């Protein structure tokens, strides 16, 4: 093909890029005049100009650039100035990459890159971009490698979409975590397969496989607490039958064997025949809410119990003070003192009742007993305390204050402190491992039989000893009076 035919073909069939190549002065480049280009180069140029895929031909060691319309669009505002320039000068921000690539491919190798990142100045400012790249050598008539053919596919939009999707998932995960969301599910009723998302599958330990492939719905139902399962099944059935929204609260077993309270909400979807087809839904963790409700319920019961006790104790104090006072003035003064002591004792247990765990100063076991018992004594020698000095931590002090307050209240209402002649002895011993305390009441009147009803006060004592102090208590209702033995680890009393 002669020069005029070659340039005419570029002008008439090569589009805008062909016309630019034909009109460009190549004599000042290493390629030389266009009429002297070898047939192999002309063939590659014709192929890339006809291709819709962005391609570039980089000739010689310098990589003199020729390219097609697709590549011109990628080049942005740098087109057409980079036509005929060495590739390192055309893209100075990627000079190191292109220099290494040219050397490798002209050495006979082929190179491919997937989602290769660059920071390019295509339109005036820096831009993060990504490309899939494929480079192969171009061989001349003599078999020598004379250039590099590059196939360029920009993947920037896909990468940015993936990054935005990842960010959206992060935002969604944050929102779900903030809302206590555990996860979502989709129950395919026809196949009876249950598809939990990864979060829900992770919670009860099914792993990613079952969450992707589905699992029998019974596998999920097995993770529901047996006491709650019948109610959950009934709620599912009612939602499918009535087409109402599904809502259910239940306990769900976690992969570590624990239980979490959840609230599940969903809706049954129906096929064109009106039959149940799918049942998607979501689960929210409400464990902390349930624990708060339980704590509030206990607090209300305790407050109710304490109000009743206060009236009983005050009534007992009035009666006891009246029996031992010679004049109304003496009674008023004695009663005021005992009520003040009762209020002071209540300060010690306030933190246990209202959740105030910090105490300003160290409390000793003997001081705690003295303060708790003082409002209930008819005479100073009615109580004997004996044992080594033991410093109590804030948690132990509040727990023991509750215990001693309940024991003292019961003793003042029914036991040794309800009688003028009754006596109470409290003795304790301590070792490196345990502390043992014995509470012995001696009544003047013989008790006919032991109480058969365990009130809230007794339950409160056991909860304080077992849960807070990790200890144990025993009761012995003898004819002479109540005997209580309390044992707790020494280290628990310092907390």
Image (cartoon, rainbow, N blue to C red):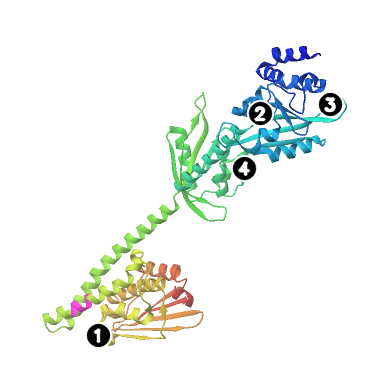
Q: Which residue is identified by label 2?
A: 82
| Residue at mark 2 to residue at mark 3: CA–CA distance | 24 Å
Q: Residues within 10 Å of mark 1 (few under 14, many from 20)?
A: few
Q: As drawn, which residue projects farthest toward the front?
A: 28
Q: Which residue is identified by label 1?
A: 379
For discs 1 and 2, the disc positioned in front in the rendered view: 2
- Residue 474's x, y, as percent? 43, 75
Residue 210 numbered tag? 4
Mark with earlier residue (2, 3): 2
For discs 1 and 4, the disc positioned in front in the rendered view: 4
Front position in the image: 184 or 369: 184
Is 75 placed left or right of 380 in the picture? right
Residue at point 57%, 56% (across, down): 256
**Residue stretch rendered in magenta on the structure:** 334-339
Residue at point 68%, 17% (across, down): 19
Q: How crowded is mark 4: few (under 14 residues within 10 Å), some or many (20 or more)?
A: some
Q: Which residue is identified by label 3?
A: 140
- Residue 169's x, y, as percent? 53, 41
């Amino acid at each position: 093909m002669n020069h005029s035919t070659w340039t005419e073909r570029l002008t008439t069939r090569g589009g805008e890029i062909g016309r630019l190549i034909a009109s460009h002065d190549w004599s000042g480049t290493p390629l030389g005049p266009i009429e002297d280009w070898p047939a192999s180069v002309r063939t590659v140029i014709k192929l890339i100009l006809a291709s819709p895929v962005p391609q570039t031909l980089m000739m010689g060691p310098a990589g003199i650039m020729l390219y097609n319309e697709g590549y011109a669009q990628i080049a942005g505002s740098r087109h057409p100035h980079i036509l005929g320039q060495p590739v390192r000068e055309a893209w100075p921000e990627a000079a190191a990459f292109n220099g290494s690539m040219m050397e490798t491919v002209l050495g006979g190798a082929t190179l491919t890159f997937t989602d290769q990142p660059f920071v390019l100045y295509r339109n005036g400012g820096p831009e993060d971009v990504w490309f899939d790249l494929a480079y192969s050598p171009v061989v001349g008539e003599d078999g020598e490698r004379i250039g590099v053919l590059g196939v360029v596919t920009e993947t920037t939009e896909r990468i940015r979409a993936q990054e935005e999707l990842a960010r959206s998932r992060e935002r969604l995960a944050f929102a779900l975590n903030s809302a206590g969301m555990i996860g979502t599910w989709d129950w395919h009723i026809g196949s009876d397969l249950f598809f939990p998302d990864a979060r829900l599958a992770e919670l009860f330990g099914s792993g990613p496989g079952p969450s992707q492939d589905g699992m029998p719905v019974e596998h999920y139902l097995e993770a529901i607490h047996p006491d709650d399962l019948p109610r959950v099944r009934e709620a599912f059935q009612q939602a499918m039958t009535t087409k109402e929204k599904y809502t259910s609260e239940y306990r769900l077993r976690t992969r570590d064997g624990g239980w979490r309270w959840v609230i599940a909400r969903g809706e049954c979807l129906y096929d064109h025949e009106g039959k149940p087809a799918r049942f998607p839904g979501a689960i929210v963790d409400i464990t902390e809410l349930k624990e708060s409700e339980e704590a509030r319920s206990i607090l209300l019961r305790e407050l109710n119990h304490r109000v009743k006790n206060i009236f009983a104790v005050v009534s007992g104090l009035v009666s006891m003070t009246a029996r031992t006072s010679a004049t109304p003035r003496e009674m008023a003064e004695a009663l005021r003192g005992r009520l003040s002591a009762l209020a002071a004792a209540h300060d010690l247990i306030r933190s246990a009742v209202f959740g105030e765990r910090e105490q300003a100063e160290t409390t000793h076991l003997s001081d705690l007993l003295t303060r708790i018992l003082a409002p209930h004594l008819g005479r100073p020698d009615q109580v004997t305390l004996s044992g080594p000095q033991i410093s109590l931590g804030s948690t132990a002090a509040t727990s023991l204050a509750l215990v001693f307050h309940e024991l003292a209240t019961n003793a003042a209402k029914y036991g040794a402190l309800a009688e003028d002649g009754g006596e109470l002895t409290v003795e304790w011993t301590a070792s490196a491992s345990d502390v043992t305390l014995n509470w012995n009441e001696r009544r003047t009147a013989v008790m006919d039989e032991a109480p058969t009803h365990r009130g809230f006060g007794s339950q409160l004592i056991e909860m304080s000893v077992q849960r807070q102090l990790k200890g144990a208590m025993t009761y012995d209702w003898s004819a002479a009076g109540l005997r209580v033995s309390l044992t707790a680890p020494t280290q628990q009393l310092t907390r």
